[in-house]
Amino acid sequence: MNKKLLTKTLIASALVLTTVGSGFHSSSNYNGINNVAKASEITDSELWKNVRDALKDANIIDKTDNENVKVTYKIENGGENTIEGTANLENISTSNNPKINPQNVTKINITRKNSNYPNIDANNTWKKLTEKLKEKNIVNNGDNVSILSTDPKDETVFGKVGEDKSNVSNRYINPKDINEIQITKK
């Protein structure tokens, strides 16, 4: 066995031994540099923070104490749990902080008080939101994401993750009217 292959084998073996049971998975690329990726399950507070950050990145919220983000997700027994907090929080703690699969999110509710936002392009907002949710492993290509509004004049903005456009084009929506995001798995 050549020295380079032996070194890679020993590094990989050491990683397996040190990461078993730690909640982390390791891999090694061809340069011998090791990459560590978190396991697919995260706490509900990490899930909430990922959703909150995706909403901020899509310009749907400003992360202030005037905004509240509530995330609904499925649990193992088929029921649902929720976690919510004001958008300016960096950490949320629940009594048991269970590990959950971020793919189990079904709904995101947003409430605001005294909000004053400029209108935003509905299709661009939908696209940015779905990209950010996908980056955070909350949705996959083919999942349906819908943005609902309290304004009766606003059409629901929806589409499949991975597509370039939602069902609307050349439409503007005011973020203060966005009150719910629905996620339907393919």
Image (cartoon, rainbow, N blue to C red):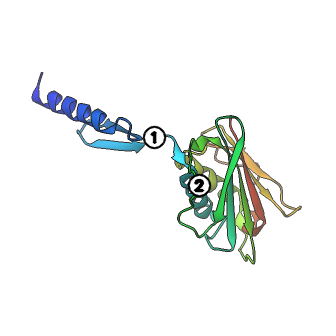
- Residue 158 position within the rendered picture, expressed as x and y whole percent measured from the top left: 74, 48
Viewer-side residue, 145 vs 103: 103
Q: Secondary structure at mark 2?
A: loop
The residue furthest top is 1
Q: Is residue 62 above or below residue 78?
A: below
Residue holding disc 2: 95
Viewer-side residue, 103 vs 160: 103
Q: Which of the 4 quarters of the picture holds residue 30?
A: top left
Query: What type is the residue that disc 2 sits on?
Result: Ser
- Residue 164 position within the rendered picture, expressed as x and y whole percent measured from the top left: 64, 47
Q: Which of the 4 quarters of the picture holds residue 76?
A: top right
Residue at (83%, 55%) from the top-left corner?
Answer: 155
Name the disc covering residue 39, or none.
1
- Residue 78 position within the rendered picture, expressed as x and y whole percent measured from the top left: 71, 35
Mark 2 crowdedness (10 Å alpha carbons): few <14, some 14-19, many ≥20: few
Discs 1/2, front: 2
Query: What type is the residue that disc 1 sits on?
Result: Ala
Quadrant location of the N terminus in the rendered image: top left
Residue at (38%, 41%) from the top-left corner?
Answer: 22
Q: Which of the 4 quarters of the picture holds residue 88?
A: bottom right
Residue 86 showing in the rendered view: yes
